[in-house]
Amino acid sequence: MLKTLIAGASALALTLAVAGSASAADKPLYGALMKTLSNPFWGAMEKGVDAGAQKADVELFMEAVESDQATEPQLNACNTMLEKKPAVMITAAISSTNLLPCLKHANELKIPVVDLDGNLDPEITKKAGVDVAFHIGSDNQAAGAKAADYLISALGKDAKGSVLVIEGLSGNITGAKRANGFAEELKKAAPGFAIVASLPGDWDSLKAANITNDTLQRYPDLAAIFCANDDMALGAVEAARAAGKDKLIVIGVDGNVNAVKSINAGRLNASVAQLPYLVGMQAVENAKKVLAGEKVAEFTYVPTLVLTKATLDSKTDPLLQYVK
Amino acid sequence: MSAALSPPASPRSWRQRVFGAATFRFESLLVLATLTIVMTVLSPVFLSVSNFFNIVLSTSVFGVLAIGMTFVICSAGIDLSVGSIVGFSGVVGAMTAANLNLPWPVCIVATLAAGAFAGWVNGFIITKGMIQPFIVTLGMLGVARGTALVLSDGVSIYGLPPEVVYLGQGRPFGVPAPVIILLLTALVAHVLLVHTRFGVYAQVIGDNENAARAMGVRVERHKTLLYTLSGLLAGLAGLLFAARINSGEPTAGLSYELTAITATIIGGTNMNGGRGSIVGTIIGALIMGVLQNGLNLLAVRPFYQQIAIGAVLVGAVWFDRVNSKEGWRR
Amino acid sequence: MSLLELEDVRKSFGAIEALRGVTFSVEAGAVVGLVGDNGAGKSTLMKTITGIHRPDSGAIRFDGASLVGKDPGDIRKAGIEMIYQDLALARMRDVAANIFLGRELTRNVLGVQIIDTKRMYAEAEAMIAKLGARVKSVTQIAGQLSGGQQQSVAIARALTFNPKLVIMDEPTAALAVREIEHVLELIRTLASHGIAVILISHRLTDVFAVCDRIVVLRQGAVIADDPKSQTTMNAVVAHIVGATDVPRQGAAR
């Protein structure tokens, strides 16, 4: 008896935490499936999606899963969301393949699918017969290249030195593109640099810190570290400064709120801001266009901005408003 | 001479006759029913055939794991490696198909065999080395996951044969294939646990291992079989997981062992071993599935879902202790 | 040839020599009392006979065949049953399940051996009735029975498969007076049916009440082995505490 009360009470109590209760049925319902909210990058994207939804005057049904490795739970969440028959499904897939069965079902239900932040490999979706309305994200390849350009501008293109690259989650296309963009640009523009190690940090700051420590053991004169996201860059920079390496240049990608704090405090050197807020906002805008029958480009790249102490201090760049 | 036996044994209760000697925790069924009602009230789409299939589909992978876990926990053991074996076996299977281009039956057999092998290693070390299951399977948790990452070079292996993908995404007679596989596995496991010596001995070993040994049960051999079974079922879960997303992911099943343990305990299996119930485990898995699905429909943050599941687990066991009329406690 | 023959049985656990060359035998239908102080090796010796321990050296023969190396299941099948001091019951299972523990009755269903609970309940009831045990129903869970009832179940289990030798380890230790008399009565009944009994007990009055022979174990070896008529309780006590302390057979070499 008591047990059933507890079960009922906990279920009811939790509904108080529901963001935006589902009463008004007149506004179209947009479904947004994120990866995880524990990373500030995705937090900013969520805010952007929210802002976009408010601007477009639609109702938003947003879901996320507990970690950015929870592939099956994300697939389950996707299936569940389709039960509510949203007008459009905006998804940030954890891997190129984990949501495919659900997206196929969305196609069958004539619900357009939006690839948020370029997580779906177009080759794979075509092979699987899944139709994606459009892909929107930052050009991860270009972001990596911009990070390399910053490094070259800081140390000079004829400089020599060893560089550590800390990649994202193994097999994730975003991380792969960023690391690849960085490596290629570096090789092209400043061949004096040598990438001595390129290891997966799984988007995790502690892992990146450990990798940094281990690499510094072998290469104490490491010149720079490029990390495929800010969480890892923050881990790496803490490890580097703790080891006394104040001249080591550490560059991240995302431009998230913690990275901004770190740059302002003079610890992290730079971060390529991918403006997830802007990505989220534009995704919803473009989704509305698709539903209205307008044409939208298949691949939309949102511009990036290299954040350094100088950029942040001068406050002149217009894109800074999207850094959340 | 003392008084002769009174009238012939009282007929067994209806519960005992239908479900055999291993009765489950009836209260869990009530919790499941209550949750279903609450969720339906809060989200009308909850009570639909397609949503129901979604719920069972979402529990199919860790449900299969929980079935294996039930046997192991009955014997007063534990298997912490099943989540890692899901990833390991999925990678092995995907490699036979995508890298070695072997026909689809090989893929299925390889996946199951990989799981069974890992489980057998667990059983071997536990019995021959006489090391606690907690420690051995904790070690295998790392070894299996690491091996999966090594074999796959850390990358998902995409592209399984269509026959295999059907096991994860097909809908024979409109019912998702993993649902059918879960229910079939549960049926076979129930018969095994309750109606065969294999299952009875699993429970007796957890109840009183010395008595089992004294009465002629070959305890070491039996334990090895139990862990092999757990590994085999983890291989099956790995097959379902890979088929659902059409790729062998080395990170598949991360922390699923905890989910499997939770479902098993909520369902009524005694954590200290001795009595277990497959029916209860399935109910426990469904409770977790209903919670997750219902809270997803309400767009509740995943963090709250974790709190809810933890609360239900402890609540379920606590109230069972308080209300228990059966002599399960020691 | 005796039913059970032990010859120079030795067993060590690491540095501890539990059995230092035990030699004695038991005839069919005889009741042998095995007495000795705590730590003398009585339980270890019995567990070696039933196959839980494997002797380091020495011979154990039952009905002429060697028991050494056989596992407990096979030894039960050969006809030796033991009622352990802690009763060795599965406390979460019912009476019938306990009676048939290790030897469940099965029937063939579609090629699979399914446990035949119906037959097990029927035969368990019959055995309980035959013993006159005060167990209300064989569906009761063993852990919920009283100590005396639990022992009835252990006894029923030992007798269900027509053993030739029954070993009882301290069967009367936790019983009330009336129940003790039942156990002694049972031992006499078994003996009259040609079933040999080894009774381990520290209650010498019980031992002298039912046993034909009394074997005293001290520090892992037999130091006295006499028919009841040729010894007294005082003599036995003296042997137990070591007052006589000249080892009779094969102790330290």
Image (cartoon, coloured by chain):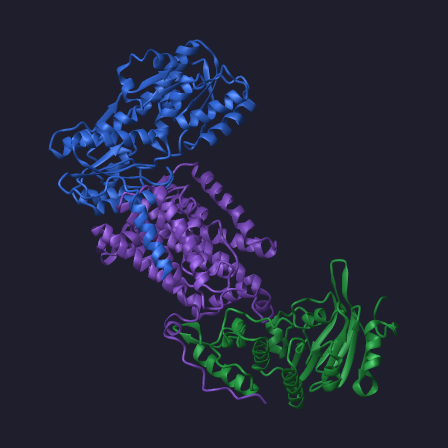
Chain colours: A blue, B purple, C green
Residue at point 58%, 80% (across, down): C152
Residue A135's x, y, as percent? Answer: 24, 31
- Quadrant housing residue B66: bottom left
- Quadrant housing residue B247: top left
**Height in image: A150 above or below B215?**
above
The quarter of the rendered structure image containing the C terminus of chain B is bottom right
Residue B211 appears left or right of C170: left
Residue at point 52%, 57% (across, down): B77
Residue A307 appears left or right of C241: left
**Height in image: A187 above or below B193?**
above
Residue A128's x, y, as percent? Answer: 25, 41
**Height in image: C219 above or below B127?**
below
* Residue B107 can be seen in this image: no
Residue B324's x, y, as percent? Answer: 45, 65
Residue A320's x, y, as percent? Answer: 29, 18
Residue C250 appears left or right of C78: right
Residue placed most toward the observer, A307 or B162: A307
Residue at point 69%, 87% (across, down): C29
Residue at point 35%, 46% (across, down): B305
Residue C44 appears left or right of C251: left
The quarter of the rendered structure image containing the N terminus of chain B is bottom right
Counting every numbered tag in the picture gives 0
**Height in image: B249 above or below A323?**
below
- Quadrant housing residue C116: bottom left
* Residue A105 can be seen in this image: yes
Residue placed most toward the observer, C110 or A268: A268
Q: Residue furthest left?
A: A293
